[in-house]
Amino acid sequence: MLFPGNLSLDQAPPISVPFRFLLSAPLFGVLAGLLLALQGPALLAGRWTPGVLAFTHLITLGLVTQAMCGALLQMLPVLAGTRVLGAVAVGRVTHLLLGGGTLALAIGFLADGGPWSLAAAALLGSAFLVFVTALGWGLARAGSANPTVVAMRLAVIALAVTATLGVGLALFWGGIPGLLFLRSLTDVHLAWGLLGWVGLLVLGVAYQALPMFQLTPEYPLRLRRHLTTALFALLLLWSVLYRLAAAERIPSALPVSAAATAGAALLLFAAFTVRLQKRRRRPLPDAGLAWWRLGLAGLAIAVTLWLAGRVWPGFAAHPAYPLWLGGSYLLGFAVPILNGMMIKIVPFLAWFHLQNRQLALGRVEVSVPNLRELLPERTTRWQLRIYVAGLGLLALAPLWPALASRPAGLALAASWGLLGFGLGRAARRYRRVNRQLLAPAAGEIPAA
């Protein structure tokens, strides 16, 4: 079997493997939104408040990483033509450990460390050890070295770095002695997570997802071959320069220059993406496209805010600045892009599996729903409107916390709840039609 674009699905895992991650991811977003609504102004009092840390990790681990792990388990066999070692077992174990570890970490932040943080370190460390080992095994055996596979390899390396630093920080937060030095690596942990794990994987997936789902021309070959590798190299260079500058061994302008170059690379990706979207072969209204446009705008805002903070130190010193910067990248860029992918991947997988089962069984009398019947456009557009309202309120919340913070949390929770409802509806429709396909046809005598 083939996906469009000659992508092999022969070795793909059962649909339950990616669905397990993709359907549970929105629940963590709902929890994050409710946490903001519950704590309100107290959560946004600073970058390092327990509420901000819990909220951030519910998004980065619970929403973003859950969905990305599910997508990778589906994509690696499809794009690289190689199996994930024990995909079904790896999916179950990773999902359980990652979900439990995320909840434990959020509670640990809110409870000021202690046993919850130690439990989170154990659960998350185990989850990423299993996942990275299985994915690394598959990527090492991949015969294909297309740009998306290269981006996946680099993203998994970035995930390993992020997870190693994160587990160490969780152990420190839990009271393990001798780990104080890790506090100075918090920004490195953040950069490898957001720019490396999330950024590199978004770029790699975009090379396949846009031509496939949005019917755009392909990205230029030179950009696909070199952009993700250059971004990874810049991240590695920045990490070294950052540590040397912190030790006052080199001027601080050097890591800033490396980071600025990485920002320019991301803007280059955004510019090419918008250009390709304008050349779509079927320029019809599409909620997935709208989510991508929102995400690309968020990326441009994040890079602009970062540059403004370097040019005007007084602006960077404003208490709202780190919240705006982190929010624009995570909630303005990463989450909308991921959302735009999820609302395409889930109905497409459901339709594709049903279509192939129908053909294999010859059950032409059973109607297989199309993508928009599985996940109606109306649902995704309402989710987008509510999300944009939540983002706007969240942008105002650092300035008027009493007025905007709780409504922002409720709007975000409602948006992610609607996403979960829509994806769950598509999954339920898949199961119902699948049962119809597997049931004996009218007049057929069941086997004894």
Image (cartoon, rainbow, N blue to C red):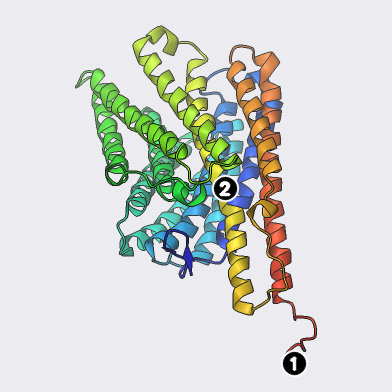
Q: Earlier in the sequence, mark 2 or mark 1?
A: 2
The 10 Å Cα crowd at callout 2, few under 14, some 14 to 19, many 20 or more, is: many
Residue lying furthest right = 443
Quadrant where the C terminus is found in the figure: bottom right
> Does residue 192 appear left or right of residue 322 in this picture?
left
Residue 30 visible to the viewer: no
Of residues 120 and 140, the one drawn nearer to the viewer in this rendering:
140
Count numbered badges in the picture: 2
Residue lying furthest top = 314
> Does residue 319 appear left or right of residue 200 in this picture?
right
- The location of residue 216, given as percent across then percent down, is 45, 45
Q: What residue type is labelled 2?
A: Met
The 10 Å Cα crowd at callout 1, few under 14, some 14 to 19, many 20 or more, is: few
180 over 12 or under it: above or below: above
The mark found on residue 342 in the picture is 2
At numbered mark 1, what does the secondary structure look like: helix, strand or loop?
loop
- The location of residue 81, given as percent across then percent down, is 39, 65
Residue lying furthest left = 249
Q: In which quarter of the image is residue 46?
A: top right
At numbered mark 2, what does the secondary structure look like: helix, strand or loop?
helix
Q: Quadrant of residue 409?
A: top right
Of residues 386 and 443, the one drawn nearer to the viewer in this rendering:
443
Residue 421 visible to the viewer: yes
Q: Name the residue under label 1.
A: 448
Are the residues flagged by discs 2 and 1 in contact, CB closer than 8 Å? no
Q: Which amino acid does label 1 sit on?
A: Ala
- The location of residue 412, given as percent across then percent down, is 66, 32
152 over 87 or under it: above or below: above
305 over 160 or under it: above or below: above
- The location of residue 177, given as percent across then percent down, is 42, 36
- Label 2 to label 1, Cα distance in Å? 42 Å
The residue positioned 48% from the left and 20% from the top of the image is 322
